[in-house]
């Protein structure tokens, strides 16, 4: 499996604080079958993004994990005005392995009414946004249809592995599974931070998707699509998102029916 959203670097953000803690996380991912990880430190108001320091930390980890785990580098990119301006000047500073793909994270308090235009501008400049964990954002939980024009425009969507098993609450769990069932999700990633509080959980997510949906979907979301992102390749054919171009009809009635307009 490929895990493209992961706070693996030590002492750069709210992830592990020591080399030993980073290596413990890496060992946990190796044990559950992950072969490639993109280290994605935060770039937000709380944690300054330092590419040089990030690369130094990554090289230390590579030295310890050589031959057992393939590591890449990206960013957990907060969608602030300042960050977006910096991105225009130097996109590869933030993108995954210097490719076209960028993890983007919304604030929990507000999402700009011009976000569709912002995403379009990114794509014109060669950047493909990957919307991270919408199932954990209260604004998108209240109105999932806000994502429809972004997905129509070519944005990708990443759901957190642990959301499938209730780590972030019932609402996140149900929304994550509903989005997957509607084919609105392209990638599963761990967003791991620590062994104690935010472990990887990719193997559990893979098994759940295989059991509740099918093998093809589990492979596509956990191996094929994130693998293409890691390598900077165009994603292969994707299933048509249910209801993306019209008033959505719920996949099955339940907790999220009212949120999706059913």
Image: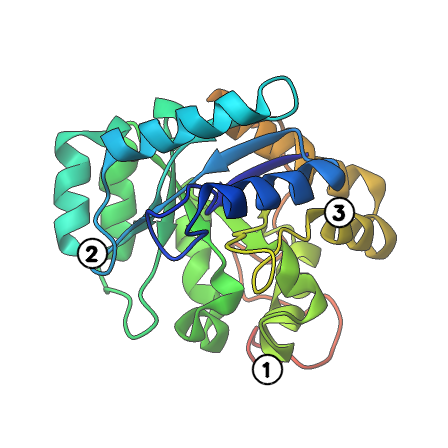
The number of callouts visible is 3
Few, some or many C-alpha atoms within 10 Å of disc 1 (few <14, some 14-19, many ≥20)? few
Q: Is residue 152 among what the camera can see?
A: yes
Instruction: Answer with the quarter of the image where residue 59 lies.
Output: top left
Specify which label sits upstream in the sequence, 2 or 3.
Answer: 2
Which numbered mark, 3 or 1, is in the foreground of this view?
Answer: 3
**141 to the left or right of 161:** left
Residue at 24 percent of width and 64 percent of height: 113
Locate residue 140, reporting x and y percent: 44, 69
Which numbered mark, 2 or 3, is in the foreground of this view?
Answer: 3
Q: Secondary structure at mark 3?
A: helix
> Which residue, given by chain and number where applicable, does mark 3 sit on?
203
**223 to the left or right of 62:** right
Locate residue 253, reporting x and y percent: 74, 77
Residue nearest the viewer, comparing 7 with 207: 7
Which quadrant, please, contains the N terminus?
A: top right
Please, is residue 7 above or below residue 225 in the view? below
Which numbered mark, 1 or 2, is in the foreground of this view?
Answer: 2
Residue nearest the viewer, comparing 30 with 148: 30
Which quadrant, please, contains the C terminus?
A: bottom right
Please, is residue 141 above or below residue 15 in the view? below
Tell me the distance, in whole angstroms, between the alpha carbons under discs 1 and 2.
30 Å
Q: Are marks 3 and 1 in contact (CB under 8 Å)?
A: no
Q: Secondary structure at mark 2?
A: loop
> Which residue, given by chain and number where applicable, does mark 2 sit on?
80
Tell me the distance, in whole angstroms, between the alpha carbons under discs 3 and 1.
31 Å
Q: Are marks 2 and 3 in contact (CB under 8 Å)?
A: no
Specify which label sits upstream in the sequence, 1 or 2.
Answer: 2
> Which residue, given by chain and number where applicable, does mark 1 sit on?
258
Few, some or many C-alpha atoms within 10 Å of disc 2 (few <14, some 14-19, many ≥20)? some
Instruction: Answer with the quarter of the image where residue 85 lies.
Output: top left
């Amino acid at each position: 499996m490929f895990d493209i959203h992961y706070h693996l670097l030590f002492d750069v953000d709210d992830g592990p604080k020591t080399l030993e803690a980073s290596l413990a996380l890496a060992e946990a991912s190796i044990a559950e079958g992950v072969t490639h990880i993109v280290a994605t430190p935060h770039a937000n108001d709380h944690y300054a993004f330092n590419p040089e320091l990030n690369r130094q930390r990554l090289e230390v980890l590579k030295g310890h994990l050589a031959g057992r785990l393939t590591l890449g580098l990206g960013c957990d990119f907060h969608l602030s005005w300042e960050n977006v301006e910096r991105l225009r000047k130097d996109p590869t500073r933030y993108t995954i392995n210097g490719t076209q793909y960028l993890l983007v994270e919304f604030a929990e308090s507000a999402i700009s009414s011009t976000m569709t235009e912002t995403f379009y501008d990114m794509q014109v400049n060669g950047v493909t946004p990957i919307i991270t964990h919408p199932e954990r954002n209260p604004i998108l939980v209240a109105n999932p249809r806000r994502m429809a024009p972004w997905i129509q425009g070519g944005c990708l969507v990443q759901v957190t592995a642990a959301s499938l098993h209730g780590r972030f609450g019932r609402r996140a769990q149900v929304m994550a599974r509903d989005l997957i069932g509607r084919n609105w999700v392209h990638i599963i990633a761990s967003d791991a931070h620590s062994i104690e509080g935010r472990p990887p959980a990719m193997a559990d997510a893979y098994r759940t998707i295989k059991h509740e949906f099918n093998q093809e979907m589990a492979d596509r979301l956990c191996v094929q699509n994130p693998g293409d992102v890691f390598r900077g390749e165009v994603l292969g054919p994707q299933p048509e998102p249910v209801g993306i171009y019209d008033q959505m009809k719920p996949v099955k009635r339940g907790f999220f029916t009212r949120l999706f307009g059913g």
